[in-house]
Amino acid sequence: MAQRRRHYERAFEQYLRTARIPYVAVDEAKRSLLPDGARLKLADGGQGSGRTLKSFDFVVYGDNTNLLVEIKGRRAPRRKDPTRVGGRLECWVTRDDIASLRAWERLFGPGFEGVIVFVYECDGQPPDGLFDEVIEEGGRWYAVRAIALDDYEGSMKTRSPRWGTVDLPREAFERLARPFAPPTRASPGPGGVPPGPPAMARIA
C-alpha cells in the first residue's frame, strides 16, 4: 500500500484493496505544470490558481470508464439519534480542485472521468441503512459518497469567495451523491458484500 498522508485516503485505499478494485495511487505531494499556454478554467468562467495542476489521489480502473478520483475527507455530523444522520454532510471543495481535476480529464483523454469521493469519518459504526458503503480502518469508521465531476460542477455554488471554495446545496448533494461501487452479483467484497465495477453506471 502506498504511503498516504491522510487517514481518509488510507481508508479509501484499504477499501479498494479489500474490494479488489484495480487502482494506482497518485503522489499528491507534487503539483504538475500545465502545458505551455494552458490555463485552468471552470464552467462558470472562473479560473484555478496559476499554471500549476493539483494532483488528484487515485486512478481507478473499470470495464468501461477509468476514474480520476479526488478524495475529500470530512467529519460526519454528530448524531443525537443513533438511527439517523446528525445533520448536513459537508461537501465543499476548492475551485482549484475542480479546475485541476477537469484539466486532468482533458490530459488523460477519452475513457477517463473525474469523480469527487467524500470520505466521512463517523463517531462509530454507522447504523445499517444510513450509508451504502462503510469502511473500518485503523479503529476508525468511515462512510463514502461519490459525485461525478460533471454533476458537481453543474450544480455547485460559491461558498467563500475569499477562500475560493464552492459546495452543493443540500438538495443537490442528496440527489447527485452515489455509492462509489454499488453492490452487484460479482465476487464478494468487504464483509461479504459483492462490490460493483468502479464505473459507477449513473455517475460516470
Image (cartoon, grey):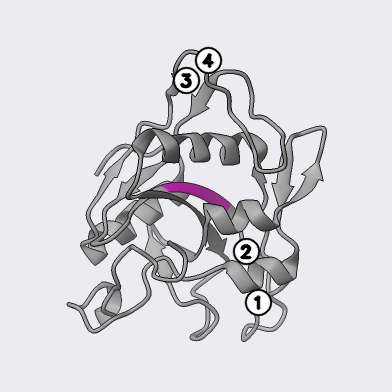
Residue at the location (48% across, 64% down)? 142
Mark 3, Cα crowd under 10 Å, few <14 / some 14-19 / many 20+, is some
Principal SS element in the magenta part?
strand
* 150 lies left or right of 200: right
Asked if the residue at tag 1 contacts the one at tag 2, i.e. Cβ–Cβ closer than 8 Å, the answer is: yes
* 71 lies left or right of 193: right
| Mark 3 vs mark 4: in front | 4
Residue beneath label 1, please? 85
Q: Earlier in the sequence, mark 3 or mark 2?
A: 3
**Disc 3 secondary structure class:** loop
Asked if the residue at tag 2 contacts the one at tag 3, i.e. Cβ–Cβ closer than 8 Å, the answer is: no
Q: Amino acid at mark 2?
A: Ala
Q: Earlier in the sequence, mark 4 or mark 2?
A: 4
**Disc 1 secondary structure class:** loop
Residue beneath label 2, please? 76
Residue at the location (43% across, 26% down)? 29
- Measured in 3D between alpha carbons, the distance from the residue under mark 2 to the one under mark 1, in whole angstroms, is 8 Å
Q: Position of residue 69 (x, y in %)?
A: 42, 48
Q: Position of residue 151 (x, y in %)?
A: 58, 59
Label at residue 190? none
- Measured in 3D between alpha carbons, the distance from the residue under mark 4 to the one under mark 2, in whole angstroms, is 41 Å
Quadrant of the image occupied by residue 199: bottom left
Mark 1, Cα crowd under 10 Å, few <14 / some 14-19 / many 20+, is some
| Mark 3 vs mark 2: in front | 3
Q: Amino acid at mark 4?
A: Gly
Residue beneath label 3, please? 34
Q: Earlier in the sequence, mark 2 or mark 1?
A: 2
Any part of residue 161 in sight: yes
- Measured in 3D between alpha carbons, the distance from the residue under mark 3 to the one under mark 4, in whole angstroms, is 8 Å
Mark 4, Cα crowd under 10 Å, few <14 / some 14-19 / many 20+, is few
Asked if the residue at tag 2 contacts the one at tag 4, i.e. Cβ–Cβ closer than 8 Å, the answer is: no
Q: Which residues are magenta?
A: 69-73
